[in-house]
Amino acid sequence: MNRNWIGLGVLASIALLLSIDVSVLYLALPHLSNGLGATAPQQLWIMDIYSFMLAGFLVTMGTLGDRIGRRKLLLIGSAAFGATSILAAYSVNAEMLIASRALLGIAGATLMPSSMALIRNMFRDPKQMGAAIGIWFSCFMVGMAIGPLVGGALLEHFWWGSAFLLGVPFMVVVLVLGPRLLPEYRDPAAAKLDLASVALSLATILPVIYGLKEIARGGVQPVSLVAVVAGLAIGVVFVRRQRSLANPLLDLRLFANRAFAATLAILLLGGIVMAGTTLMSTLYLQSVEGLSPLRAGLWLIPQNIAMIVALSAGPALARRVRPAYVMAAGLAVAALGLVLHTQVPVVEGTPLLVTGLILASAGIALPMGLGNGIIMTAAPAEKAGSAAALSETSGEFGVAVGVAVMGSLGTAVYRGLLPSSAGAARESVTAGMAFPDLLDAVRDAFTGGLHVVAGVGGLIFLGLAVLTIAVLRRHTPTPA
């Protein structure tokens, strides 16, 4: 077997770990909360601080990898991730675990863009690169699918810290095999990092992500709104600074490439729709259908399997048909899945809902896998780390914005369909289920919200399909 494909196995193991790590923590949270005596706010910070730091440092770490060497940064990040995992596993209080999770987020930010950038260097042929990216993403989805099973087995036999120790063997493999199998690459013309730009990028991303998560959790409040506005305002300053620097932290010239900019927008908007749809679907299964969290999770496994299959099939289809048409077809299939969502009944709607999720997940997997290939080939080789970081950052923003905006849309419809006399039941579907005399009205209202969110998402997917063909139909997967 070609050495590069074996090296891909090392990089794919990182994707597998990162996705398992996230899904396992959801199961471990009750156990570690009892063990450490974590308060409700501390539990939220234990969950959220990782994604805050990950999103905040992706751009910086992507550019840093371009400058000091992608393999070097990957190995440094792997060592830091392994060491911090041990620190998290043996935390003696909630504050220590929160700090450990913050460090894990920073270490995680070194792993993802470095992995994608190294794939860009290892597979120069665009078709091979597309297949490699498909495998990498498939491993990420496998981790999401098996994470609850692995976590359940660990927590049944060991203490909550085992959920964090799971990552240590993976990092040891990377540290042992990485220097032998992964090539080194850096931008020979790179200059030193502009620390002011690093500070501005963090001051842009962290408040926006925080504000969006708070809006999704508790609605629009002054603090969350101020955080988003402040982050966006600092973002304007960040962009202006990048335009004035000879060696910017984020090279805005990447956006001058139409294929790069359009694909990034497609992935961002697609992520927004899928995050919002998955949120509403999960709430439907648990609140309207009355399923336990475990049974609801099992019903979501088929969509992950569909996504894995589609991610693997995408590169093969793109060898026969132009990538733009494959991506547009996938978006059309995803739109069809959301059309099914608009027909989900209030009673016994699980089969139709799951069918819609399978179609939507399989459909969005095609532009997701092929789109990342286009992003990586559209960017010059020396900017591959920055390009990968932008792709990953757009994914983080997509989830945050999708949960906040699409979730808020569903909540607004839900409240609008309930009578004003419903009182506290209008706060959320979860609150509404506590009122036995309003159960039918609550279920009807929430299902109406699901229909609206799905309908809006379907229209967005169809619009993205048209955009894909309009902008990318002449794109051939060749490096810039």
Image: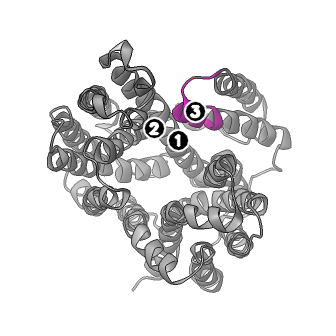
In this rendering, position of residue 330 left or right of residue 472: left
Q: CA distance from mark 1 to mark 3?
A: 14 Å
Mark 2 and 1 residues: CB-CB less than 8 Å, in contact?
A: yes
Whether 216 is among the magenta residues is yes
Mark-to-mark CA distance, 2 and 3 = 15 Å
Secondary element under disc 3, as helix, strand or loop, is helix
In the current view of this chain or complex, which residue is farthest to the front? 437
* For residue 150, above or below residue 339: below
Disc 1 marks which residue? 394
Instruction: Please determine whether, in this image, residue 208 is positioned above or below residue 289.
Output: above
Residue 233 is labelled as none
Distance (Cα) linking label 2 and label 1:
5 Å
Q: Is residue 43 magenta?
A: no
- Identify the image quadrant of residue 300: bottom left
Give the percent coordinates (x, y) of residue 165: 62, 78
Where is mark 2, residue-wise? Answer: 268
Which label's residue is closer to the chain start, 2 or 1?
2
Q: Position of residue 290 (x, y in %)?
A: 28, 48
Which stretch appears magenta? 209-221
Give the residue at mark 3: 212
- Disc number lying in front (1 or 3): 3
Q: Which element carries disc 1, helix, strand or loop? A: helix
Q: Amino acid at mark 3?
A: Leu
What residue sits 31% from the left and 35% below the top? 436
Looking at the image, is 222 positioned above or below residue 301?
Answer: above
What predominant SS class does the magenta segment belong to? helix
